[in-house]
């Protein structure tokens, strides 16, 4: 398994392409679809599904075209379906925690509400795609419609109980030189929001 990171769009969103054999899973494909198509083509990859960390516009607004093009489904937690504005026929909708197998990989969606009601973190082995729930040194906003600060705190506490070696891939790469990647262990030591959630 190989993970390609693409930082796309004017909000520095991270789209991830998870390569496994000749197949690919796409996490939050949203901006600059041609860049995503080109990467798939150059690596001879056939997409198996798109996985959405949540329903905010900047994480999926261009995804309908991609889902149609490849005839695949977008996996999303039901509380964020309406906000996503994606047609239901293109979606695989689940409720709460959800496990499945895609492209030969065990996929675990951990329901981590707070930034939005339907926010999930996607766990594949030791890799965790956190969307806007957890960033290196920070966490997502909890002052948006559908946000809930207490829920976000509970979700961060849940993530802090994952194995410390868990690798985190977040939903934005904020600022030059800023990384979108970290580990749960590093965040437990350094992230003030995780520390607060664990108090
Ligand atoms: Zn968001």
Image (spheres, helix red, strand yellow):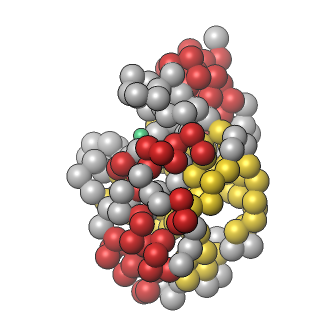
Image point 43% across, 72% down: which residue?
Answer: 66
Q: Nearer the viewer, residue 20 or 96?
A: 96
User: Residue 164 appears at what percent x and percent y?
Assistant: 69, 38
| Residue 170 in the figure: left or right of residue 92 | left
Q: Is residue 189 visible?
A: no
Residue 67, x across and y down, in percent: 48, 71
Tell me residue 18's x, y (percent).
56, 68
Name which residue lies at 50% across and 80% down: 70
Q: Quadrant of residue 199?
A: top right
- Against 197, residue 48 (above or below) is below
Vertical placement of 6 versus 160: above or below? below
Does residue 196 lie above or below 58 as drawn?
above
Can you see residue 146? yes
Res. 174 image quadrant = top left
Quarter placement of the N terminus: bottom right
Residue drawn at 64 percent across, 22 percent down: 154
Q: Total marks drawn? A: 0
Q: Residue at x 69, y 44 (%)?
A: 95
Q: Residue furthest top?
A: 199
Quadrant assignment for ligand 1: top left
Q: Where does residue 11 sit, x and y in percent of width and height?
A: 28, 48
């Amino acid at each position: 398994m190989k993970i390609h990171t693409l930082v796309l769009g004017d909000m520095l969103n991270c789209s991830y392409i998870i390569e496994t054999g000749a197949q690919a899973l796409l996490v939050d494909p949203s901006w600059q679809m041609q860049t995503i198509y080109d990467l798939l083509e150059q690596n001879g990859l056939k997409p198996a599904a798109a996985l959405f960390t949540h329903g905010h516009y900047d994480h999926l607004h261009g995804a309908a075209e991609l889902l149609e093009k490849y005839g695949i489904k977008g996996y999303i937690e039901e509380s964020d379906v309406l906000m996503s504005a994606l047609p239901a026929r293109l979606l695989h909708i689940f409720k709460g925690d959800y496990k499945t197998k895609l492209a030969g990989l065990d996929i675990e969606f951990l329901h981590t509400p707070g930034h939005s009601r339907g926010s999930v973190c996607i766990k594949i082995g030791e890799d965790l795609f956190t969307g806007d729930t957890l960033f290196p040194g920070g966490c997502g906003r909890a002052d948006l419609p559908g946000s809930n600060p207490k829920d976000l705190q509970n979700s961060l506490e849940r993530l802090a109980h994952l194995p410390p070696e868990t690798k985190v891939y977040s939903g934005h790469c904020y600022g030059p030189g800023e990384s979108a990647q970290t580990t749960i262990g590093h965040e437990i030591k350094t992230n003030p929001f995780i520390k607060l959630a664990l108090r």
